[in-house]
Image (spheres, helix red, strand yellow):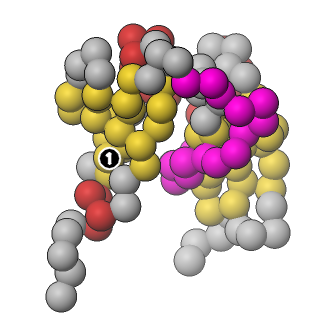
């Protein structure tokens, strides 16, 4: 018996120094904003939630230490959009032996967002 709906069971909470800058970043990627406040915001991608918590004294790590994977039907479209927006690329687009064509960008505080498309139907 499941305790919680899968879209709310495992939720990532990301620390951000500037809530508005981070909200603009994630909106630009295509996330839906479900709750927008100065201290705590909730975003969603196809119903799966991502929390942003305002921590103005947060010191981002020097290198990406984690990422959130978003599966999309056309990763090349998202790659072009990331380049047009001049986002910080962590890992350029490529095909990988784990079955994805993907790339990773960093949010304003260094958290990775990885977009990927399956190379073959599962």
Q: Residue at x 37, y 53 (%)?
A: 11
Residue 72 sits inside the magenta stretch: yes
> Residue 95 is drawn in which quadrant?
bottom right
Task: Using the image, determine if residue 114 lies above or below residue 122.
Answer: above
Q: Residue at x 69, y 60 (%)?
A: 100
**Callout 1 environment at 10 Å: few (<14), some (14 to 19), or many (20+)?**
many
Task: Please tell me whether mark 1 sits on a helix, a strand or a loop.
Answer: strand
Residue farthest to the bottom, as pictured: 1
Task: Using the image, determine if residue 54 lies above or below residue 61.
Answer: above
Residue 61 located left or right of residue 96: left
Q: Which residues are magenta?
A: 58-77
- Asked if one can make out residue 44 in the rendered structure from this viewpoint, the answer is yes
Residue 43 located left or right of residue 101: left
Q: Residue at x 24, y 21 (%)?
A: 36
* Residue 40, image x, y percentages: 29, 28
* Residue 9, image x, y percentages: 30, 64
Q: Quadrant of the C terminus?
A: bottom right
Residue assigned mark 1: 49
* Residue 85, image x, y percentages: 63, 14
Along the line of sight, the residue nearer the viewer: 52 or 92: 52
* Residue 15, image x, y percentages: 48, 32
Residue farthest to the front, as pictured: 57
Task: Using the image, determine if residue 39 lies above or below residue 79.
Answer: above
Q: Residue at x 55, y 48 (%)?
A: 68
């Amino acid at each position: 018996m499941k305790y919680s709906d899968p879209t709310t069971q495992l939720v990532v909470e990301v620390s951000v120094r500037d809530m508005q800058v981070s909200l603009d970043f994630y909106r630009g990627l295509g996330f839906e904003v479900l709750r927008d406040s100065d201290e705590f915001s909730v975003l969603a991608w196809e119903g799966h939630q991502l929390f942003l918590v305002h921590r103005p004294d947060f010191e981002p790590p020097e290198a990406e230490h984690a990422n959130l994977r978003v599966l999309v039907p056309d990763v090349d479209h998202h790659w072009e959009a990331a380049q047009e927006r001049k986002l910080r690329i962590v890992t350029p687009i490529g095909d990988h032996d784990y079955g994805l064509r993907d790339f990773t960008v960093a949010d304003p505080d260094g958290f990775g967002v990885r977009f990927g498309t399956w190379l073959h139907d599962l």
